Image (cartoon, rainbow, N blue to C red):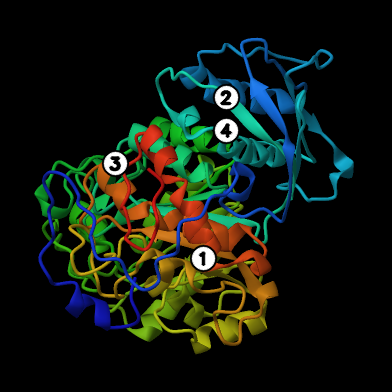
Amino acid sequence: MTSGPTRPTVRRTALAVVAGALVAGTAVPATSAPAVENSAMDNIIPAPESVHPDPATTFELSEQTSIRASGDAAEVGEYLAGVLLPSTGFPVPVNGDELGTGGISLELDDGAGLGPAGYRLQVTGETVDLRAASAEGLFNGVQTLRQLLPAAIESPTRQPGPWTVPGGEIVDQPRFEHRAAMLDVARHFFTVDQVKRYVDQIARYKMNRLHLHLTDDQGWRIQIDSWPKLAEYGGSTEVGGGPGGHYTKQDYTEIVEYAASRHITVIPEIDMPGHTNAALASYAELNCDGVAPPLYTGIEVGFSSLCVEKDVTYRFVEDVIRELAEITPGPYLHIGGDEADSTTDEDYKAFVSRVLPMVEKYGKTAVGWHEYGKAGPQGESVLQYWGTTDSDPLLNEAVARGNKILVSPANKSYLDMKYDENTPLGLQWAGFIEVADAYGWDPGSYLQGVPEESVLGVEAPLWSETLENSDHIEFMAFPRLPAIAELAWSPKGTHDWNSFAQRLSTHGPRLEAATTNYYKSPQIPWTT
């Protein structure tokens, strides 16, 4: 996504296809934060609402440790036990019995007063007590607990320990309810297991939405029974001419259910009326001239459009929306709407006006890139802003109508932008985004005329023109995704670059223990 006509020109540059190791820069910029010694309680990302360390107290995980959790808390308890087992070797039992010495308690507590996603974590010398109003809150608290343990806890193989947790209390809840990461599986296809890996990685930083960009000019990635050639033919390639691929409905359901087990809601996107060459190539009747174009493997944008005047277009769109809504339990369906440069404004408005009632008909709330605001979406519809400036009249009109705004400015939150001119992956049409750039803005006040109460949340999109595997995804997402996660979760008053850089420095060993690739930004005083 870009601001208007700029992107098609800028993005004609050749892909930076990378082989071998990804090497970070060496120059240390003026924004580099000094290294200081902190306790684990001071190194949580996203920063909690309040932290009260007790330096005199330490809890130690041992072979005798058990987890007490019952009812809806039991599933989170089993998840925690699964996190602890590979590195510690401790088969921590989960039960609803009385908590013994050296135990971890997960308890649902309606009186916590921290909303559905908040939690209270108290660590003493004898117990770890985690309380929340819902399983979602307990799950978020578990992500904090694993950051309190040594970095080796993230290892997939057994490590020697010891496994200590610093004493104290953390009380926490998110600033924004909607904290999203987007993965483009259309430009390059990623397998179910690769998507699951990313789900686990974003969950560690308390992200709770996964936006899947399922269709584009280069590939159609989701099975639609009533239009089978979309996936079979439209999904048969990708950028650069690779084999592509698609998700069966069973595959997609597996992703959705796995994400839900991590308290992440999947938001599927079918981009239209532009970014549709894969569909147009699959079915000639969707083209105004009745002639199917060839499959496309480049990276230019803005050249394709569904035929707005044909009735078959709307039969096609409704079939796709109906079938996708049936297998998507979450409340949102993203209809794209960006860079429809080959569709006149009149046709664009007519198209969106016919499509929005279809989304509502099948029980979903529409999300679209902010350009679809010119069609005047009403009520609960969400505009996702991806521009590179801090204002847009479409946003002001949307706020006046009562629409919510999802904030993802391309020059701040796009994880596919290069870190600097030497970055071997990514693009640069929105500028270079180092970690300090990703962190140095406030989602609640960034857009002129959009008050914080109109901001639904924050999203970090990751487009895949240059990304071919999980190593590439991780190199571009980390460490910028934790920066965006903190802006979305933590109170505005906690946002401080020097503090964040220091805390992030301690996460290098965690990422390495988890075998997560990342860019060793020279802005961060990484812990060795």
Mark 3 or mark 1: whose residue is earlier in sequence: 3
Mark 3 or mark 4: whose residue is earlier in sequence: 4
**Three-letter amino acid code at disc 1?**
Asn
Question: Looking at the image, do the residues carrying marks 3 and 1 touch, with CB atoms under 8 Å apart?
Answer: no
Disc number placed over residue 149 in the picture, else none: 4
**Three-letter amino acid code at disc 4?**
Leu
Q: Which residue is under mark 3?
A: 470
| Residue shown at the point (61%, 87%) measured from the top left | 449
Task: Judge by depth and name the residue closer to the eye, 315 or 335.
Answer: 335
Mark 2 or mark 1: whose residue is earlier in sequence: 2
Quadrant in which residue 99 is drawn:
top right
Q: Which residue is under mark 2?
A: 163
Q: Which residue is under mark 1?
A: 498
Quadrant in which residue 423 is drawn:
bottom left
Q: Determine the CA span between mark 2 and mark 1.
A: 28 Å
Mark 4 or mark 1: whose residue is earlier in sequence: 4
Q: Determine the CA span between mark 3 and mark 1.
A: 29 Å
Question: Looking at the image, do the residues carrying marks 2 and 4 touch, with CB atoms under 8 Å apart?
Answer: yes
